[in-house]
Amino acid sequence: MQADVVVLGAGMVGVSVAAHLQQRGRAVVLLDRRGPGEEASFGNGGLVQREAVVPYPFPRALGEIWRVAQNRSVDVHYDASALPAFARALFAYWKNSAPARHRAIARHYSTLIATATREHESLASAAGASALLRPVGYIRAYEDPAAFAAEVARAEGIRREFGVNFVALDGAALGEMEPHLRAGFAGALHWTDPYAVNDPHALTLSYARLFERLGGHIARGDAMTLVRAGAGWRVAAADGTTIEAAEAVVALGIASDRLTRRFGYAPPLFGKRGYHLHFKPQGNAGLTRPLVSNGFLLAPMRAGIRLTTGVEFARPGAAPTPVQLRRAEPIARTLLPLGDAVESAPWMGIRPCTPDMLPIIGPAPSEPHLWLAFGHAHQGFTLGPTTGRLLAEMMTGEAPFVDPLPFRAARFA
């Protein structure tokens, strides 16, 4: 099979890249070992986070570092034997989280985030999936009055600098907005700009179907079979066919560097594992929008109330260890009337992260006609359509709608 471009990886990022290239007249094959959106894109909190202009920093305060180091928290868990392999990347992450450096990174990061909702709107409209983008935002609730006051002040600064919107709610207003939530919160921030998606997989599939309607082809296969074929590329599909393309895009999430290392590019990619489990609500209980509190997220989904965890550091390929879900579930049950778990076992996925908190978007520095789109950490679902448009514009010679320089692969070469 001949194509102009083969996109490797069918998560939200890869599907979006493929759709944007197909819209621009390229003949594209989208290849993955599984169906579209079945790996990390499947298990997120379902938020298009327009407010997430400041990427998550490494803790800098000694008290916060000590809290995490005790390894008893809900939001962070680690396997001590795995930490040596993370040491170099985490040290760089810590350095990049110094206040001045982190502010500079946020200014670059915000240029992507600022486009996220409208780029999803564009693809969803073309895909006939606009109804999946619910304009209800999400809530961060606080039990401690001092912590709530500090977060309101921080949010005011973010609003002034980046133009995002929120409403500060006292406990009574929060109760009116979410009547099934238990009382007693000091207050909450309602971030009003994000979209909430109650079936993230369905949204990814809708973009994949749009890609097919535009003439694109989806194939199953192992991206690791990619080899040079003259000036272009060749990869094997699972049905025995061979796909040849002039250009290739690596959008394989946490597995991306396994492939790029074969072609001379070894970025310091590392993974943050996360889990989710759905619960049936009791009676008519529910949430109208996602809620973040106590280090976890509760999100109303078609499958039930999704409880998602924070960050786990573990050895590559290690068996799931859903410690954080076991810690979070009893707390979640005090916040909202939850019934039985829907699934017999939790879902697990891995967020692909870089030490400077910025994704890698653009040409590979080591090989011509090889393009990269990975390292989005917690925001692959949010930034898929933005990344797809930006990379497609770069590949087709259009003027990029966002400055791609901060996300260049060569910064890690």
Image (cartoon, rainbow, N blue to C red):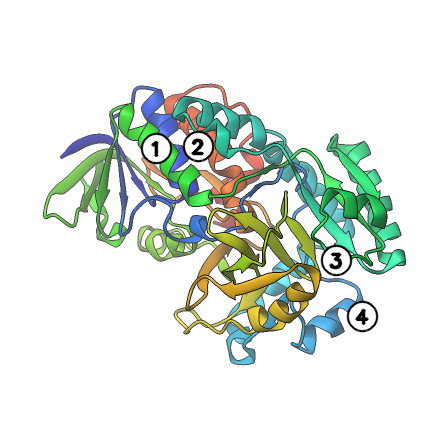
Q: Secondary structure at mark 1?
A: helix
Residue at mark 3: 182
Say what amino acid the circle numbered 4 marks: Gly
Left or right side of 384 for 220: left
Q: Position of residue 135 (x, y in %)?
A: 61, 32
Q: Position of residue 401 (x, y in %)?
A: 54, 23
Left or right side of 155 for 407: left
Q: Residues within 10 Å of mark 4 (few under 14, many from 20)?
A: few
Q: Position of residue 48 (x, y in %)?
A: 57, 39
Q: Quadrant of residue 86?
A: bottom right
Above or below, comparing residue 37 to residue 270 in the picture: above
Residue 330 visible here:
yes
Of residue 289 and residue 30, the one placed in the foreground of this image is 289
Which callout, 3 or 2, points at the residue further toward the start of the chain?
A: 3
Residue at mark 4: 63
Residue at mark 1: 18
Q: Quadrant of residue 186?
A: bottom right
Which callout, 1 or 4, points at the residue further toward the start of the chain?
A: 1
Q: Disc 1 to disc 2, how far (Cα)? A: 7 Å
At 35% from the left edge and 57% from the top edge, which residue is drawn? 258
Say what amino acid the circle numbered 2 marks: Gly
Q: Disc 4 to disc 2, how far (Cα)? A: 40 Å
Decide: marks 1, 2 in contact (CB < 8 A)?
yes
Residue at mark 2: 388
At 11% from the left edge and 43% from the top edge, which residue is drawn? 241
Which callout, 3 or 1, points at the residue further toward the start of the chain?
A: 1
Q: Secondary structure at mark 2?
A: helix
